[in-house]
Amino acid sequence: ALTTRTIETPRAGRRGSVYEIPLNPTQATAVRNALAQSIYNRLFDWIVARVNRSLNSHSHSAHTIGVLDIYGFEIFESNSFEQLCINYVNEKLQQIFIELTLKAEQEEYVRERIEWTPIKYFNNKIVCDLIEAKRPPGIFAAMNDACATAHADSTAADNSFRQRLTACTSNPHLELYDQNFTVKHYAGNVTYTIDGMTDKNKDQLQKDLLELCKASGNRFLQDLFPEPLNTDARKRPPTASDRIKLSANELFTKLMQSQPSYIRTIKPNENKSPTEYDDQRVLHQIKYLGLCENIRVRRAGFAYRQTFDKVVERFYLLSSATSYAGDYVWKGDAKSACTQIFKDTGIDSSEWQLGVTKAFIRHPETLWALENQREMYWHNMATRIQRAWSKFMAHKHDCATKIQQAWSLSRDRLRHVKEREEARSILSGRKQRRRHSMASTRTFYGDYLGVLGSGGQFIRETIGITENDAVLFSSRGETLVARKMRSAKPGPRILVLTPRDLFVVAQGLDQNGVLTHTLEHRVALASISQVSMSPLQDGWMVFHVNSQPDLVARCDLKAELMYRAVKASGNRIAVNISATIKYNNKNMKATALKFEEAGASPHEQFEKKVVRVCSGLPSSSESRQVKKVVPTTTMTSAYRAPRKAAQPATRRPNTNVVVPGMSVPTPASVATTITAGGSATPKKKGVTSANTVVTTAALEATQQQQELQPAQTQTYSAANSVSSSSTQVPPPPPPPPPAAPAATKYPRYKALYDFPASDSNMELVANMVYEIIEKSDSGWWLARKEGETDEGWVPYNYLNSDPEPPKQAVTTNDKPSNNHLNIAAAMKTASQGLNDRTSNSMAELAAALANRPASPNGGIAAAAAARSNFASRRPAYNSRPIMNDDSDEEWV
């Protein structure tokens, strides 16, 4: 097939003769090249089809987005068939650009009856017809005819092609020369060489080569030629120009069905340099790309056009006539709505026009202004929504915070109360209770020494645990330390309980005075059979270990240690309560530890295996209930509760106030009442007016009686006041001052630092003095504030090491003059109603002050008489006790 060619001659509709014609070297070379070119083209098409099939979506889509990369025009010194095909495709794309932009836009203005000025532009359809037309024949048609009549000599075909081009010279965009021709493309004039052009256009793949490929043993090569072979076909196979024209027309049809957007690229120079810019070349490209015409059309036309419904749908929010609260409320048609929107937004009438079906906006700035107004509308709406949402979320957050605080406090307290009650239930009321264990704030904290914290590094290294391990309990305590030839003695130790072991760590100083830690005991919880405790309030515990010496330890937080150990063992460890505890010492000999209740000392005494401790609270004593913590509510100005109306201030009468100048009654004396006349009448014989005691209760009773019988009121004159006061006996000296409060029996310490409060710990405030009720070796002291009953644990290192001096009773020997007190009382009585008293009351008060005798009780008697008389005349003041004035002074 590469060296011969099969030719069949027809004969009157019947099969003719078949000839095999040998090929000359030139023809054989052309056939070989045609076969290689065909295989290469089909392989490239197969790769493209395979990639598209892999990238194709599995679901059907009505809309797709495609990207078309256009290489651009090719203008070289020698241009041949390849450059003609590429430039032809660019002419077709330019024609699409003109059809979709310039021509289509001006036709739309005419169709919509928009007033505008038409713009002239170059339409390259005449260039496209010059290349692809059949009648009159174009360049591709003349080339195909030359290839059909050419034989083995390609030069003859080129000459035939040149002769046929003479028929195209009527087109002004073609210039024909001897061996070349020039086409005036939209991007510039391009001169093509005729020599060899027809040979490149021929299709040398004859039927013999197709039969050869389809009969190949390579399956992949057979798949590259899927079309069926028709041996009876008389039609010539398509040439290269036919395939290019067919592909360009298919692309043209597909692009016309879409809405293309263009990105025009401009080549700044021919050297591919980022720093060079050839002005002439750039201007040439701008001119021949048609950008100038496009800009002129856009300037003369309208930048934005859209149907009435779409415009109203997007911009109806900008007019109050078309929208309300985000809803469309216009009752008319869409065209009138567009007119209303443009008027309400303040757009000049020259910037917009309404066509038959569309609204047109001339400049992009106008469209941007509308878009900005729309964005501002949504921004304002979003701001309102955010503000309302922020208020709602703030309220929700406040409510959630209150609920979380209440739940957190309740949950922690319930958990702590539950643990404490479980520990108490394990003891089953068989052991006396300590006073501090009754506190409501007692919490099972667990790791009191902070073994897992930064300060517990040495302890962790000693017992061989890490920060990720669990520590159930840690505290300071004591264990029985064996001594040579002597009985064991309690020694301070550190007790650490983990989920598996109980560690006993001893502290000491080495030769250099550095604190060291030594692991003394490690008892596995699995080996502990039971824990023995005494029924008293002591803190001693005996851990009975299988096949090992028992561990005897003392801890102030014994209940928590016992509870943690029992829970860690899965309630396997039993708790035994006995006054005599038998245990195995280090030599595995049975030894007894006895407990006795004796003495009043709060500290335990250990002597010769006997522990003496004072009696504690009964084992049935209940712990104090946990106080409810009401979270404080912060009221903002927006939710402040309304103020209540101002109420008249009322003061409870003090029944213990004694009028100066009167005697203090003895148990046998009886308080007298003041009659309507103002004199004191004793109820019992032998009690004179000098020994009369005036109480506020009696004064109130008298004032009520005066209100009920206003007609019986009598007035005192100054003479009567003097005569009545002259018969009185001087009173005894005033009573002694009240006794100083008894000094507290607990030592007082001042806080050096602030310490926050927790569930079991009390808050410390710097420079405040606290009473220390109990000191524990664990480093926590039971304290309370001065004058309060609430107790709690505080760290001892936050307190001053030196106690505060005890409080001293404050006494004074300064006694105020009764005479001065009488004058002050009289002046105070006079100043109560200075603005609203009558002239008679003022005269009586002045007479009482002027005729005040030298005796200290005379003046007060006159003042009391004048005050009583004034009270009888002004019933509005009768509800107030005589000596219970609204002032900052009181009689003592």
Image (cartoon, rainbow, N blue to C red):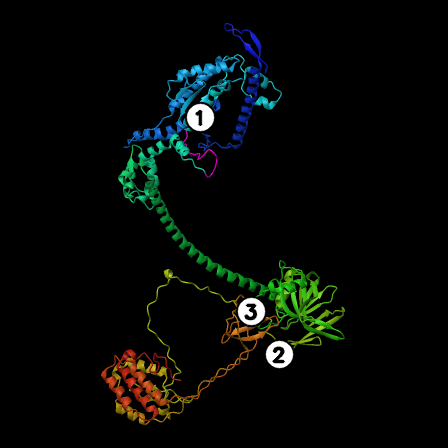
Image coordinates of residue 688 in percent, x first then y, are 36, 92
Q: Of all residues shown, which one is farthest toward the left?
A: 839
**Residue at 35% from the left image edge and 27% from the top image edge:** 122
Q: 424 above or below 337?
A: below
- The kind of secondary structure element at disc 2 is loop
- Which of pointers 1 and 3 indicates the residue nearer the eye? 1
Q: Is residue 182 visible?
A: yes
Compared across the picture, whether 742 is left or right of 339 comes to right
Question: Circle 3 is placed at which residue position?
Answer: 623
Does the CB distance between marks 2 and 1 fall below 8 Å? no
Which residue is denoted by mark 1 in the rendering? 87
Image x and y of residue 115, in percent: 27, 32
Q: Determine whether 203 is above or below 518 in the image.
A: above
Q: Amino acid at mark 3?
A: Ser
Q: Is residue 573 visible?
A: no
Look at discs 3 and 2 and give the one toward the viewer: 2
Q: Please tell me whether residue 383 is drawn above or below residue 590 in the rendered image.
A: above
Residue 33 magenta: no
Residue at label 2?
601
In the displayed structure, does residue 16 sit left or right of residue 319? Answer: right
Of the two numbered discs 1 and 3 on the same chain, state the one appearing first in sequence: 1
Q: Give amino acid for label 1.
A: Asn
